[in-house]
Image (spheres, rainbow, N blue to C red):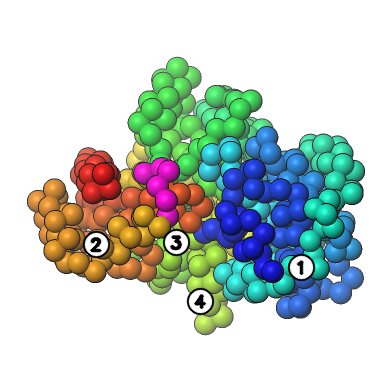
Amino acid sequence: MFLKDLAPTVGFGTSGVRALVVDLTAPVVATYVRVFIQHLRQTGQLPAGTSQCVVGWDLRPSSPSIAAAVCAGLQAEGLQADWAGCLPTPALALRALQTGNPGIMVTGSHIPFDRNGIKFYTAQGEILKADEVAMQAISVEALLPQDGQLPNLAECLAQVHAQSGSSPALAAYVARYTNLMPAQALQGLRIGVYQHSAVGRDMLAQLLSQLGAQVTSLGRSDHFVPIDTEAVSAADEAMAAAWCAQHQLHAVVSTDGDGDRPWVCDEQGRFMRGDVLGTLTALWLGVQTVVTPVSSNTALEKSGHFGHTQRTRIGSPYVIEAMQALQAQGHNSVAGFEANGGFLLQTAQKGLQPLPTRDSTLPILAVLAMAQHKQQPVSALPSLLPARFTQADRIQNLPTAQSQQLIQNLAQDKTALQTFVQFTDSQAVHTDQTDGLRITLADDSIIHLRPSGNAPELRCYTEASTPEHAQQLLTASLNQIKTILS
């Protein structure tokens, strides 16, 4: 019996384990944790004498109970929880790096509240695809709780509730950025922080205030809000625009639920796409080698600002693998980002130590500092890059197998492909199947279709030379897909 046999709907997605909350039972969670620890022992990634594992969680209503099951699984393996409390995922990753201990974050990131997940970290960073494969090959018969019971679960849950507040892990994460930025670096900026249910909502507001910004907290919610930075709606931008007008703001910033994806709107309420944010952050840091998935904006290459760029499949493990390989080849200024805006730092830059996992705080600070230094509005910063604009959205509640079949048909049938893109008044001249199906049209615009790795969704990304054209492509592509599916 293996992990895949525990619960059919529980498994590894693009990054970490994702599933419906009802399927993330305590025995299933504890078994995944035990397999993770055993894998680290088998591969020499758990140093002798290690007695703790960093544990954190987000603000989803189901997260404390899952964190308790994580604790029970650790105890079964002879480890204790180093409680990091409620904090952003990159803060937990930093704690693991600094202490030399593994880490486990309970979070479903941006997906709906009826789902949740678990992210695993070694003392070197988040686990890679090879780790996932090895974990799935470990037999679990001897690891399952007898009769499905975890006798210490109530004790673990009490610890979770007692340790939910601020922690040394969160303090170290804040210090990482207060040490990076000059005192009062953001003085004169009026920044709105859209708090919703983001786990780092108070931390972000306090950090910006420490750096001199005048902060207005907005939109705090007691209910979980599934913010997806790759599917920002017109309503979200209208909300940001209203806040900017009401409070005379220079920007509105936020993150997704677990704080590894940034959400930035300029002084007019217009959302800055994550891949533009990532490129600007790399530029601000002075990075020479940049890795990003195939779905990111091609302004990265067209800008000419970087000595080397590399494209990967979508998902932070693929970006990390490529960054590690480039560093091993001798590249000494390496970073990466995803289209969702999460920024990954592989090598030290500007005195900032590596943090090779998605981070939302660094890109938020980078664009605000860049705007402040140049004495320009945030809305002017994208003009530093070539005029390439992206849009993204998804069709929800679509079985992954159905998405895969649609993509396979388009990839294998040239007639079907040209029929699909006929609404563009152009033709498909190139396709890329690195991850999903990326279609380049004769006018250099792009349509990219890909099944989500985290949920039953078909994601659609578009790119064009104007934002209007990118939006038109997105709307028409989604309508065309719905027509085909119906």
Q: Which mark is residue 410?
A: 2
User: Taking 307 as reference, is 475 left or right?
Assistant: left
* Residue linked to disc 3: 314
Residues packed near mark 2 inside 10 Å, few (<14), some (14 to 19) or many (20 plus): some
For the point 64% across and 63% down, which residue is it?
5
Residue 70 shown left or right of residue 251 in the figure? right
- Regarding residue 154, the answer to whether it shows in the image is yes
Query: The magenta stretch spans which residues?
Result: 395-400
Q: Residue at x 53, y 77 (%)?
A: 325
In the figure, 82 relative to 294: above or below? above
State the residue position of label 4: 326
Q: CA distance from mark 3 to mark 2?
A: 20 Å
> In front: mark 1 or mark 2?
1
Q: Which mark is residue 141?
A: 1
Q: Secondary structure at mark 1?
A: helix
**What crowding class fits label 4: few (fewer than 14 Cα within 10 Å), some (14-19), or many (20 or more)?**
many
Residue 384: x, y in percent? 33, 50
Q: Earlier in the sequence, mark 2 or mark 4?
A: 4
Residue 195 in sight in this render: no
Binning the other alpha carbons within 10 Å of mark 3 as few (below 14), some (14 to 19) or many (20 upward) gives many
Q: Earlier in the sequence, mark 1 or mark 2?
A: 1
Amino acid at pointer 4: Leu
Give the residue type that dot 3 points to. Answer: Ile
Instruction: Give the SS element for disc 3.
Output: loop
Residue that extends furthest to the left in the rendered view of this protein: 425
Q: Is residue 14 magenta?
A: no
Separation of disc 1 and disc 3 at Cα? 33 Å
